[in-house]
Image (cartoon, grey):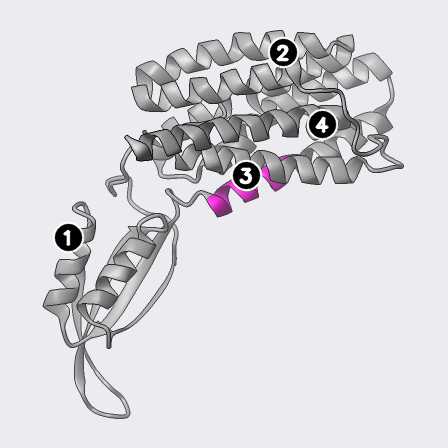
């Protein structure tokens, strides 16, 4: 019960951080968000209406939350609903503050970078506690499990359509090609800042090969399978080039999320072992990753 309350508290904090990122950094800099948020921002910029963004945000997120209930999981959908609700309330009640000048010749880059970092932290915090900030993160959770891709990668794909729409609206409103290119540059910076922050803080879908050099291969193998029921390992005989001693190399493929627990179990099983790990790309779709939520 206590752990659940802590998780819900962190989910609420994720929503508060995302609301702050949007209200004080992202929306003032007028970059195009990803997914349906991007459509909402583009229309709000075009009509100069902050409340239009909030209304469209509620509409789009409602549809995506229904998808989350149906196709991802109930827990994930409930926690995403808490985040989205917190964002909506935050956007509506947070006081008007201005931390930097949003014009390109002034401090727009600071707003974009800090907003991207803050948004990425909020997204990672929500994901790590079995929720999301809604929008493409819901689709990211669904497709990440299906295709074993980092959740931040989905944001980049979702950005293509929304950014195109936003730039067209910008061109119609201002009629200046230079303004469109300027917005595109800053939007790209925001997308990659938030996506990279998310992928570095939330590593559920990053895969690593862990190799352990040991003489206690049975104990090490038991530690791996006990720590993660879905994981197995391979054994390879080896001989030391300098000493001539024999040993066994135990290899297992696990996620970055599982790595700390597995390493701790291996060290407890054989304190004298030597281990190393490296990232793996191109994993088979049959590889098991527990669903989010």
Please state if 127 lies on the left or on the right of 183 as rendered.
left
Which residue is at the far front?
2
Q: Marks 4 and 2, how far apart in space?
A: 14 Å
Residue drawn at (63%, 20%) of the image? 38
N-term-proximal mark, 3 vs 1: 3
Please state if 120 lies on the left or on the right of 53 as rendered.
left
Q: What's the magenta region?
A: 189-201
> Residue 177 placed where, x, y %?
84, 25
N-term-proximal mark, 2 vs 1: 2
Q: Marks 4 and 1, how far apart in space?
A: 47 Å
Q: Marks 4 and 3, how far apart in space?
A: 15 Å
- What residue is disc 4 on? 24
Query: Which residue is at the front of the view, 114 or 20?
Result: 20
Please state if 145 lies on the left or on the right of 90 as rendered.
left
Q: Marks 3 and 1, how far apart in space?
A: 32 Å
- What residue is disc 3 on? 121
Please state if 107 lies on the left or on the right of 225 as rendered.
right
């Amino acid at each position: 019960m206590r752990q659940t309350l802590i998780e819900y508290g962190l989910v609420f904090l994720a929503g508060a951080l995302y609301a702050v990122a949007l209200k004080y950094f992202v929306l003032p800099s007028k970059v195009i968000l990803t997914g349906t948020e991007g459509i909402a921002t583009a229309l709000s910029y075009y009509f100069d209406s902050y409340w239009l963004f909030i209304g469209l945000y509620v509409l789009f997120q409602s549809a995506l939350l229904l998808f989350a209930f149906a196709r991802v999981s109930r827990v994930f959908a409930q926690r995403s609903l808490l985040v989205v609700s917190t964002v909506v309330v935050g956007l509506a009640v947070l006081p008007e503050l201005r931390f930097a000048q949003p014009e390109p010749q002034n401090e727009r880059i600071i707003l974009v970078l800090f907003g991207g970092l803050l948004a990425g932290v909020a997204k990672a915090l929500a994901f790590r506690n079995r929720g999301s900030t809604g929008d493409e993160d819901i689709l990211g959770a669904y497709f990440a499990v299906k295709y074993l891709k980092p959740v931040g990668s989905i944001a980049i794909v979702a950005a293509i359509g929304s950014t195109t729409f936003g730039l067209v609206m910008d061109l119609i409103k201002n009629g200046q090609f230079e303004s469109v290119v300027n917005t595109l540059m800053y939007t790209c910076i925001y997308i990659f800042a938030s996506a990279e922050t998310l992928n570095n803080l939330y590593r559920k879908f990053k895969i690593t090969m862990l190799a352990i050099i040991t003489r206690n291969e049975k104990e090490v193998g038991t530690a791996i399978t006990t720590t993660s029921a879905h994981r197995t390992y391979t054994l390879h005989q080896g001989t030391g080039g300098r000493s001539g001693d024999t040993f066994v190399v135990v290899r297992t493929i696990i996620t970055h999320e599982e790595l700390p627990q597995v390493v701790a179990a291996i060290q407890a099983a054989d304190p004298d072992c030597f281990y190393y790990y490296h990232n793996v790309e191109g994993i088979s779709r049959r590889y098991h990753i527990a669903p989010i939520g």
